[in-house]
DNA sequence: CACCATCGTCGATACGCATCGATGATTCGC
DNA sequence: GCGAATCATCGATGCGTATCGACGATGGTG
């Protein structure tokens, strides 16, 4: 493995000059720069990360704390991970996986050992045990999700309130006066992630503003419960029933429950689910969706933390960013009476 | 951040003594060890990863190269990732994410910069573009999957051949004489991952040994094709039809196709799919499965590469490990005539 | 033409740890 | 009870980079 000293010798300059060529922190003449760059090329020199970290006190690595909860939709988590990793590379950073099973101690470890310059925490709960630790770490921490008390923390999340509002608003516009929301499955609700409340709050607000009624029904834990929820919804509805099912993991079950009752989405029932555009189109009946935009949330998360790293900020920053959600009509919802 | 020098001062010993207490590479008296450990505790000392890497030439980080291919079942990839990360921690290592979009250059980067001591490549294809690079890297590389030419490489994978054999053998034992295998979806087949061939090979071998016939049918790209495959299978079958569907992403579609033709798994049709036990039980009709044991593959993968790292092996190792698959009868297959 | 900025480069040092050789303190054998 | 072997610890050095102060060269000014 060549070192910057080797490069310096090959180019006939001092090691420090090589370093300055690379960092651009001091002016270098065109001639010298060319020589150095040629030597770098020829030796296929790559700076040693350990030495760089030791000298600069920056590792250019971000720790990503991932939840591995069977009930969550792992495919969706994976989308976060994927986009976070690619985006980090665009900012010339790498991603280190920090597993949840190490608990809060894991955060302290990777920071104290200076393996990471900062952290991204996914799937933050209302009273997350990682937060007290996160607040005391002297590195930037970015939360995906919003805890009950976000003071002193930097958070980003999809705008679930907007999502709830839009779902109700659009179903109301399509002529539905009673709208049934199938809750997230109990495993999610019991985790106390407040996006559930935010979504429901938005839906309720929109409902009372528009004079329609919304009922909340349990989303599990089993198929019988969901089937029961559907029956309750139908009993409480006059006219064409409407369902909102923001939890992806139960959409299949809902679909089957409706089918077995003779209900066809887009014909005699409206259904809004949550999915990425690609997945939505793959459904037997293309699903009208509320897109919670995991990719966009991920991109912004990385951007924010990289800015914090850049700024080398000491003071306890605090911010909260909500990513607008997008509602898309496909074939599973009734069309509004007039084209709007 | 305290350093080992701070610890040494607090304990009244030399810095090198602290280092030896930590590594155990030289004998230390009980008394001194106690003092040092107390100082470590009190200062909450954690060794600096950069300095450690620089001095020892070991980062204790393993690069994990993940595919982000929409067609793959991301939930299953996530299971690999999760288990790999946890297992790595058991060996006191961390996992760095290397995204596929950096291509083979990414591998070279993390190794030349000495961010990683070794690599795990997931989802290895027959003629994987990463292999030529992998062979020239002077660090241990572990492949999950088997390329066409595994010479000079260390590979591990589920025993797909055994999986194919077992599926056919068990369906034959249940009395089926014609067995239809729905292929992986074209996106997977076109990637030229040879587990498809290995699975089919095992199935064919078992079929000819047992005197039953096996037909292969396309698994996509769309629902119409799969429905068509089902019809072809039914047309070619006398008696109770039997399906093997190793690709998880198409199982839903298959289930619907069968249902709409009046076929109920376990009653008048047999279906073997691929899923973890938990998921299989969640199906409307608990699915008989072939478990490809991603968790076990992951654990062994980490174990192998950690052993290679330990050994600090220079010579081009080469090995190939197959993890036995497990077939489990639930309710979607007919029972064999006699209780076995 | 002497003087002073500015520019470009160099040498030296620090970062925190692992490791090697050396040294003082013990213990053992005879 | 003296040399040899063993044990526990120390001091010094190197790992490869970033960065600071210094210094020679260059160019502009009066």
Image: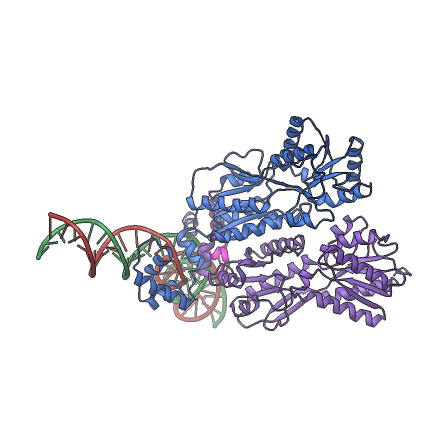
Chain colours: A blue, B purple, C green, D red
Residue closest to the eye, B13 or B228: B228
Tell me the magenta residue range.
B17-36
Side (left or right) of B300 relative to B46: right
B198 above or below A254?
below
Count of residue discs:
0
Tell me which corner region of the image, top left, top right, bottom left or bottom right, holds residue B335. bottom right
Residue closest to the eye, A132 or A146: A146
Percent across and percent down for residue D26 are 20, 59
Percent across and percent down for residue B176 are 87, 63
Residue closest to the eye, A138 or A198: A198
C28 above or below A241?
below
Q: Main secondary structure of the magenta part?
A: helix
Residue B13 part of the magenta segment: no
Percent across and percent down for residue A309 are 45, 46
Residue found at x 70% / y 46%: A286
Residue found at x 64% / y 55%: B70
Percent across and percent down for residue B273 are 77, 57
Residue B23 part of the magenta segment: yes
Residue found at x 49% / y 42%: A137
Q: Is residue A14 visible?
A: no
Residue closest to the eye, B26 or B339: B339
Side (left or right) of B200 relative to B115: right
Tell me which corner region of the image, top left, top right, bottom left or bottom right, holds residue B254. bottom right
């Amino acid at each position: 493995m060549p070192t910057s000293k080797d490069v310096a010798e090959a180019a006939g300059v001092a090691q420090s000059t090589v370093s300055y060529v690379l960092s651009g922190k001091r002016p270098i003449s065109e001639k010298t720069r060319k020589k150095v760059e040629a030597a770098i090329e020829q030796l296929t020199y790559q700076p040693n990360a350990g030495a760089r970290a030791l000298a600069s006190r920056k590792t250019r690595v971000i720790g990503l704390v991932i939840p591995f909860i069977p009930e969550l939709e792992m495919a969706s988590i994976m989308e976060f991970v994927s986009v976070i990793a690619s985006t980090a590379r665009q900012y010339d950073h790498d991603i280190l996986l920090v597993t949840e099973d190490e608990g809060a101690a894991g955060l302290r470890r990777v920071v104290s050992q200076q393996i990471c310059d900062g952290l991204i925490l996914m799937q933050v709960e209302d009273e997350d045990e990682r937060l007290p630790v996160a607040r005391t770490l002297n590195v930037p921490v970015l939360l995906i999700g919003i805890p009950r008390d976000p003071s002193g923390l930097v958070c980003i999340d999809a705008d679930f309130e907007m999502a709830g509002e839009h779902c109700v608003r659009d179903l109301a516009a399509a002529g539905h006066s009673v709208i049934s929301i199938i809750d997230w499955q109990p495993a999610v609700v019991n985790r106390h992630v407040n996006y559930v409340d935010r979504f429901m709050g938005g839906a309720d607000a929109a409902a009372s503003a528009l004079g329609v009624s919304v009922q909340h029904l349990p989303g599990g834990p089993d198929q019988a419960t969901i089937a029961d929820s559907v029956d309750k919804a139908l009993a409480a509805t006059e006219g064409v029933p409407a369902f909102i099912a923001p939890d992806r993991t139960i959409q299949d079950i809902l679909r089957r429950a409706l089918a077995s009752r003779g209900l066809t989405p887009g014909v005699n029932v409206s259904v809004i689910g949550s999915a990425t555009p690609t997945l939505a189109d793959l459904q037997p009946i293309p699903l009208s969706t509320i897109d919670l935009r995991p990719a966009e949330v991920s991109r912004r998360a990385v951007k924010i933390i990289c800015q914090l790293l850049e700024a080398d900020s000491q003071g306890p920053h605090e911010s909260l960013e909500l990513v607008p959600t997008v509602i898309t009509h496909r074939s599973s919802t009734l069309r509004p009476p007039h084209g709007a």
